[in-house]
Image (spheres, rainbow, N blue to C red):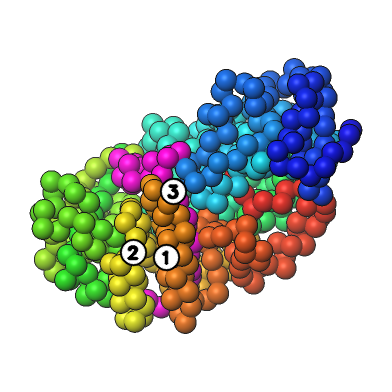
Amino acid sequence: MTVIANDPDHTQPDEQSVGLQTRDGAMSSVAQVEVRRLSGQLDGHVVQRDDPTYDVERRVWNGMIDRRPAMIAKCASTTDVQRVLTFAAEHDAVISVRGGGHNAAGLAVRDDGIVVDLADIDHVDVDTARGLVRAGGGVTIGALDAATQRHGLAVPLGVVTETGIAGLTLGGGFGWLRNKYGLSCDNLVAATVVTADGRIVRADETDEPELLWGLRGGGGNFGVVTEFEFRAYPLGPEVHFSVVMHSQADAPAALRFFREWSERAPDEVSSIGVVWHAPEIDEIAAEHHGTPIATFVAMHSGTPAEGAEVLAELEGWGSPIANLGGTMPYLEVQQFFDEDYPKWERRYYWTSSYVRELADELIDAVFESVATMPAGHSNVDIWPIGGAVARVDVGATAFGDRSASFMLGIEANWDDPDLDQAHIEWAQRIAATAGPWSTGGRYANFPGGYETDEAPDFFGGNGHEVEALKRRFDPDNRFDRTHT
């Protein structure tokens, strides 16, 4: 291969070759015939810059990410992934891996690199007899939910259905079933992985159990996971779901109540406290539109009648300005936040902080920050951590921090590119404000400034073990991004 100068404008040397960035930052020229040969070997195909679908295929959920990979390998099988990784190694090309493409930091694409795109590895197979689900690396939460609910089952997953199960699970996976059944990664029982050297490995409790340990919340940069196998649990089709909103005047007191209530709620309840601005909807009086409010969102995993009884205290506290909940299909609960997170156009910067306690001073600081934030759709989510999540031994999985009482999910969401810096700085200020109460950890799926922060603490006391596993499975650091 021919190496040319590291010139960002010189990424396509001529029409007979493709410019690929190598891992040392230089550019290499790869003959077009080699790329066509690779594409012909795949069950899927390779998309290049002159392909009419290129601009669609390179998009990811976060509209702030605008990167131009040299090639997008649309893999349709585990063998496809193996062939693409072999090709990348032969040319020392940088790679990224796309599952659902929902990672807020946009790790699924990189300029002049090769994208290993798993979107077409999208099978979902439900084993009702054993309560297990096998799902391809390109499957989204919505697709898996639809398949499992046909059998009255559910896998603990996240709360936005366009999220890919791959990145979600590899980073942890907080959702509406966490207190009852644990994180998504806690329910991963096996995985098929293509390693950096092109091996296809099954990781389970018998074969490569250390790799399975690492995939359970360890970030996933050990290889490409082409299939996940999860435990599933009886659930639905209907559940009780609470969505209770409190006015600006009542919000600080409401959040203090939420703190105390969440500590005594049973495992069947998983909840989020949301600090944001009231949407302009008919269910909320116009006087509250656009004002900072506090919202309790909670789901009970038992029968609707049980849920209504257990959540009555949450719904009955104070003088709510709206209650949008009630009995509804579990699938609708999973879709409840979808409209708030449109893909491709809205801009996102998410960071996080695990905190030991939700102190009064922290509540006040968070609410004041939201009240004064730049115009947009931003919010701070308060995730109580307890139940099944807290009962897992810290060393049982690679997931970082189970000691915290709450996680702050700090979400800057906006539309105007001119406000990028203002929103990013707003999110970073809140994370800094949480410092006195922080355990020092951060949630891998809400990573913050990944590319400028070289050593975020995602794995807590498990960090050394994660690093050792990384050296074993990817000693040359070919997978140098955290997860998809």
Q: Name the residue under label 2.
A: 373
Characterize the local packing of mark 2: few (<14), some (14-19) or many (20 or more) Cα atoms within 10 angstroms: many
Mark 1 or mark 2: which comes first in sequence? 2
Query: Are the residues tagged 1 and 2 within 8 Å (C-beta)?
Result: yes
Residue 103, compared with residue 217, is above or below; it is: above
Which residue type does callout 2 highlight? Met
Mark 1 or mark 3: which comes first in sequence? 3
Mark 2 or mark 3: which comes first in sequence? 2
Characterize the local packing of mark 3: few (<14), some (14-19) or many (20 or more) Cα atoms within 10 angstroms: few
Q: Tell me the magenta residue range.
A: 332-358
Residue at far right of view: 1
271 magenta-colored: no
Please state which of the two labelled residues, at mark 2 or mark 3, is closer to the viewer: 3
Residue positioned 49% across, 37% down in the render: 140
Quadrant of residue 40 within the rendered picture: top right
Give whichever of 182, 364 is nearer the camera. Answer: 364
Horizontal side of 101 relative to 88 (left or right) equals left
Which residue type does callout 3 highlight? Pro
User: Separation of disc 1 and disc 3 at Cα?
Assistant: 15 Å
Residue 181 image point, x, y percent:
45, 55
